Amino acid sequence: MTRYTAPGQPGAALQYLPRYDHWIGGEFVPPAHGRYFENPTPVTGQTFCEVARGTAEDVERALDAAHGAAPAWGRTSAADRAAILNKIADRMAANLEALAVAETWDNGKPVRETLAADIPLAIDHFRYFAGVIRAQEGSLAELDDDTVAYHFHEPLGVVAQIIPWNFPILMATWKLAPALAAGNAVVLKPAEQTPASILYLISLIGDLLPAGVVNIVNGFGVEAGKPLASSPRVAKVAFTGETTTGRLIMQYASENIKPVTLELGGKSPNIFFDDVSAARDEFYDKALEGFTMFALNQGEVCTCPSRALVQQGHYDQFLADAVARTQQVTQGHPLDTDTMIGAQASNDQLEKILSYIDIGQAEGATVLAGGHRADRGGELSGGYYVEPTVFQGNNSMRIFQEEIFGPVVSVTSFADFDDAIKIANDTLYGLGAGVWTRNINTAYRAGRAIQAGRVWTNSYHLYPAHAAFGGYKGSGIGRETHKMMLEHYQQTKNLLVSYAPKAMGFF
Amino acid sequence: MTYQDPAVTAPQVSRVAVTPTAAGLVQELYAAHGPLMFHQSGGCCDGSSPMCYLAGEFRTGASDVLLAALRIDGVPEPVTFWMSAAQFERWRHTHLTVDVVPGRGSGFSLEAPEGVRFLIRSRLLTPEEDAALGSVGPRQA
């Protein structure tokens, strides 16, 4: 076991500044109104830095900087843009531990995840988009002997990106890497729950980008997010969050006739067919881990496998083994490398999770494990910890229909294939799903029948670049983590060229 | 522990109530901003939170239902409480109470800069409430 030193203590992998301003035009810039808000760590509940409380004036200043930088950045060759993205990746790799500790301290998630997943995935994401922009080509269509249609990709210009708090650096990277690769300038607003790690990241990599290409405005949604999302000066808005804000952003975008991409969450089913239990082998062990993935990142994942559907033939034994596996999940100090589950990101998140544990029991669901707030003692008593919780109930209960965004899984049984698909699709959302079976035909049919943008098959919670991620139904619009995201940040320019020397003959 | 309503400001059978603390916050927000509305969110991150906006800021439409027009002391205009119709179909058996907790809210909800967050607490409707409300039902936008 390794315990990383907390920021603020001597010898920590990084020290946060006591105060962070906005990042505008390649430098830290104080907020126009001079106001700041306190940023606590969910690990202990104690404030560790102040962050600029931005307003419309700051958004305008950031948009000025972005508009100033966008034309030259858009003309920069793909090779040069890719080289910068690769340098960002290299700089992040050289500071992997510092970034991992920064992310854990701001968000509360265990450092084993930030070391092994969040930061390495972010690094690879920059490299992936550095690669695909080099390989992207326009097209031409030879319409007839004299007429050619050329199609060019052009950047949109200045885009707005609103980042969630569950994977602050990784989600910022999912949006920044394709936007920058495509030649756009960005105004980005981090979540007010977790602003600091992104600001630490920009303090590491900011010098690699031309001034104004990336601008970060901090603050609250209503004060800074709204003027950004509703600005006629942005060519596109990208948002990850929840449905009401997603609809509001679409409404603002409709006023300006701008496109949006939205990722709004899910209520992802994780389906375990009877044949999973045909042997007690490595695959069975992997499936049990797949069940327990609901606790990854404290359940604060848009694709949390928060509905487990277990076939009736092996229901009792599989569920008993799965509950036992859940009870082995180690909760503790997020900076311990042995800790598997850390703190929820905020107090209101903690309260919301507890309110769902409450209504779940009121609706008659049975708690098979957990079900309480966890007091970890000592300095952690002020943090926001919840026991990994397993409910048994049915799909009409609210705990089966709403993304709790906590370490809570709701389990029910199904009779056969058709029943599994019916339950899996009985949801407003369609972001992720899991299918576990030893039969490739079952796996294929189930994967195709589930209405969700990604179906993990005999796996879960993998987020590699080059696999498209995005939602069906109420889960949103667009596909991230894949080269197809480039086109969400590009215009198509068609040059329709006639090489015919003669007039058309109309006039 | 099962959640019990505290003294709430809804006098008769209703789908939505407001705790005294939340009512106080609504009063403050009304004084600062003007007439208000709620729209109940779903989905991830800050999903499941009731979002509080200036009345009319969020455009409701045929896909929304109005669950309540909340009467709050000191606030002349009723505060409407909306939800998407599809979500309501999955929530309609429960009674909702708007509460408030310390927190760092997200979304564009008006209270977030105050360091507090509206939160929904839920309980099952009683059979009597269900029968009474069933005959009324929420109206379409």
Image (spheres, rainbow, N blue to C red):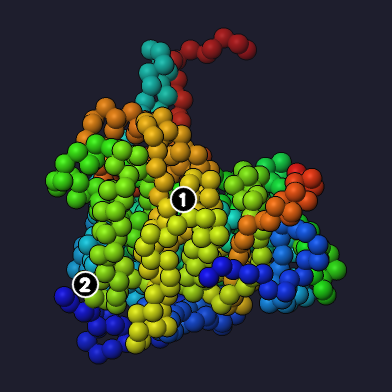
Q: Nearer the viewer, mark 1 or mark 2?
A: 1
Taking the spot 52% from the left edge, 13% from the top edge, the residue there is A503
Residue type at the position of mark 1: Gly
Mark 2 = which residue? A337
The answer to which image quadrant residue A113 occupies is bottom left
Q: Farthest residue to the top: give it.
A: A505
Toward the viewer: A51 or A86? A51
The percent position of residue A168, horizontal first and vertical second, equals 39, 64
Q: Farthest residue to the right: give it.
A: B76
Instruction: Please check whether the numbered discs 1 and 2 fall on a single chain.
Output: yes
Residue type at the position of mark 2: Thr
Mark 1 = which residue? A393
Q: Is residue A43 visible?
A: yes
Q: Is residue A154 above or below residue A83?
A: above
The percent position of residue A289, horizontal first and vertical second, equals 25, 53
Toward the viewer: A356 or A499? A356
Classify mark 1: helix, strand or loop: loop
Q: Which subunit holds the residue at mark 1? A: A
Toward the viewer: A328 or B28? A328
Check contact, mark 1 vs mark 2: CB within 8 A.
no
Compute the Cα span from label 1 to label 2. Answer: 34 Å
The percent position of residue B98, horizontal first and vertical second, equals 66, 66
User: Is A35 on the left or on the right of A442, as rendered?
Assistant: right
Q: Which subunit holds the residue at mark 2? A: A
Q: Farthest residue to the bottom: give it.
A: A10
